[in-house]
Image (tube, rainbow, N blue to C red):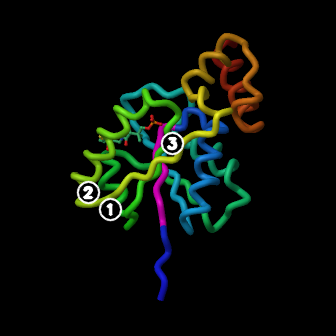
Amino acid sequence: MTQTRTAIFPGSFDPPTNGHVDIVERALELFDTVIVGILSHPEKKALFTTKERVNLLEKSFKKYKGRVSVEEFSGLLAEFAKRKKSRVIIRGLRAITDFDYESQMALMNRRLSGGVETVFLVAREENSYISSSVVKQVAKLGGKVTAFVPKHVVNALRAKLSKRKG
Ligand code: PNS
């Protein structure tokens, strides 16, 4: 019997970007199923609540029903991976500056989990300068973000930021 190959794609996703969507789509070419793991950290002030981020991600991956699931987690990623019986964590790399932190995290996660491997996927050139924090900054200052996030995220950002102003 062949085993289902599952990978976890963890992150804050505040908000999800086209870069995140692209990494998941490419991970689906390597793995049977991908669990998008949203870190829910009460101490960190996020623009979107965990529930809102779950909804935004579920909408982004609706067409991959059965292959992509969205789950929140808190605490250690290594423990989440063990609970999900996943041997692989996926992370996107945009630039060499990401590598320092990412390799440290990969080594720590492998050590803490007793063997979970991290697979890095290099971001597409057009996504290499996109991050959730830059998107938030641009949106907050009234800039256009339609090229960087899915349409429903543009709408959610608009709604969230106008509510904040009002
Ligand atoms: O999208 P982000 O903010 O780059 O994602 C970072 C994330 C959520 C993957 C990372 O902060 C994480 O895994 N946090 C969980 C806590 C943990 O396991 N820390 C130890 C790993 S070194």
**Mark 2, other Cα within 10 Å: few <14 / some 14–19 / many ≥20:** some
Q: Is residue 70 above or below residue 12?
A: below
In the image, which disc is placed on residue 92?
3
In the image, the residue with mark 2 has its CB under 8 Å from the nearest atom of ligand 1? no
Of badges 3 and 1, the one in the foreground is 3
x and y, in percent, of residue 130 in the image: 61, 28
Q: Which three-letter amino acid code belongs to the residue tagged 2? A: Ser
x and y, in percent, of residue 76 in the image: 30, 47
Q: Between residue 37 and residue 43, name the one nearer to us.
A: 37
Q: Which three-letter amino acid code belongs to the residue tagged 3? A: Gly
Which residue is rendered at x = 75% and y = 29% of the image? 147
SS at circle 1: helix
* Image position of 70 (left or right of 97): right
Q: Which residues are magenta?
A: 6-12
Q: Is residue 81 rendered magenta in the image?
A: no
In the image, which disc is placed on residue 82?
1
The mark that comes first in sequence, 1 or 2, is 1
**Mark 3, other Cα within 10 Å: few <14 / some 14–19 / many ≥20:** many
The mark that comes first in sequence, 2 or 3, is 3
In the image, which disc is placed on residue 113?
2
Quarter, ligand 1: top left
Which residue is rendered at x = 71% and y = 18% of the image? 162
Q: Between residue 6 and residue 125, name the one nearer to us.
A: 125
